[in-house]
Amino acid sequence: MLEIELKASLEGMSSEEVLHRAQSCGFVPCEQVRETDIYFNGDQRDFRRTDEALRLRSLTVLPDGPCESLLTYKGPKLDQISNTRTEYETAVADGETAKKLLEALGYRPVFTVDKTRYTYRLDDVTLCMDDVVGLGKFVELETLAASEECRETSVARLLTLLDRLGVDRKRLTRRSYLEMLLRRQASTL
C-alpha cells in the first residue's frame, strides 16, 4: 500500500481559515490526538542516508482517551512533489517492550517528534492539522493507493484539495517533521 501525502506549512496563515475552507469542502472532524514519535536508526543501516524511517508512535486520544502504540516502517519517497512512500504499520501491545526489542536488535532512538493532531475526513482523504513542538502548524492531506499506477492521480487530487483550502503550493514541503527538526537543531549548533 502506498501512502500519498502532501504537507504544507501554515506559518503566517490562519489555520482557522484553512479549517473553515476544509469544512466547506465537506471534511468532517474525527478526533484530536497527541502523537509522540520515537525514530530509530541502526548501525548496519542508516535510514537518514536511505530516506527511510523506522518509528514507534505513542498515540493518545485527547483529552483523556486511550493510548496505543504503532510500529511503522516508511520507505524512500517515490516522487518529487509529494511525500509518497511505501508504508507498513502495525499496532503493538506494549510500546515500551517494542522499544526494548528494537534496541536489542541494534536500533537506537535518535530523535522524538511531539505533535498535537486534529484529524478530518472526506471520503478516503484524511486532512490533518498538526501543531508540532519546535516547528509550528502544518496541514497534511493523505490518501492510500493500492498501486503505483494510482499514484499520479492521487497526487493530483490532493493538490486540487490543497488549492481549495487556499494553501499556496509554494508552502509544500517534502521534508518530514523529523528532517525539519534535525535541520533546525543542526543550525543552532
Image (spheres, rainbow, N blue to C red):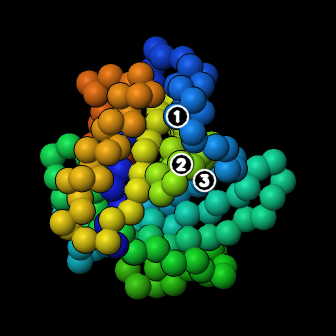
Dot 1: what SS?
helix
Q: Quadrant of the N terminus?
A: bottom left
Residue 81 on image: x %, y %: 20, 43
Vertical position of residue 80 compared to residue 60: above or below: above
Q: Is residue 172 left or right of residue 138?
A: left
Q: Nearer the viewer, mark 1 or mark 3?
A: 1
Q: Amino acid at mark 1?
A: Cys
- Which residue is denoted by mark 3 in the rendering? 35
Q: Can residue 185 be seen from the camera position used here?
A: no
- Real-space CA distance between mark 2 and mark 3, rounded to the nearest whole angstrom: 22 Å
Labelled pair 2, 1 in contact (Cβ < 8 Å): yes
Q: Nearer the viewer, residue 172 or 92?
A: 172
x and y percent of residue 32 in the render? 69, 47
Label 2 residue SS? strand
Q: Secondary structure at mark 3?
A: strand
In primary-sequence order, the first of circles 2 and 3 is: 3
| Amino acid type shown at disc 2 | Leu
**The disc label shown at residue 122, or none:** 2
| Residue that label 1 marks | 25
Name the residue at the top extreme: 12
Q: Cα distance, mark 1 to mark 3?
A: 26 Å
Question: For this rendering, which residue is in front, 141 or 106?
Answer: 141
* First in sequence: mark 2 vs mark 1: 1
- Rounded to the nearest angstrom, the CA distance separating label 2 from label 1 is 8 Å
Question: Residue drawn 57% across and 49% down?
Answer: 121
Which sits earlier in the primary sequence, circle 1 or circle 3? 1
Residue type at mark 3 is Glu
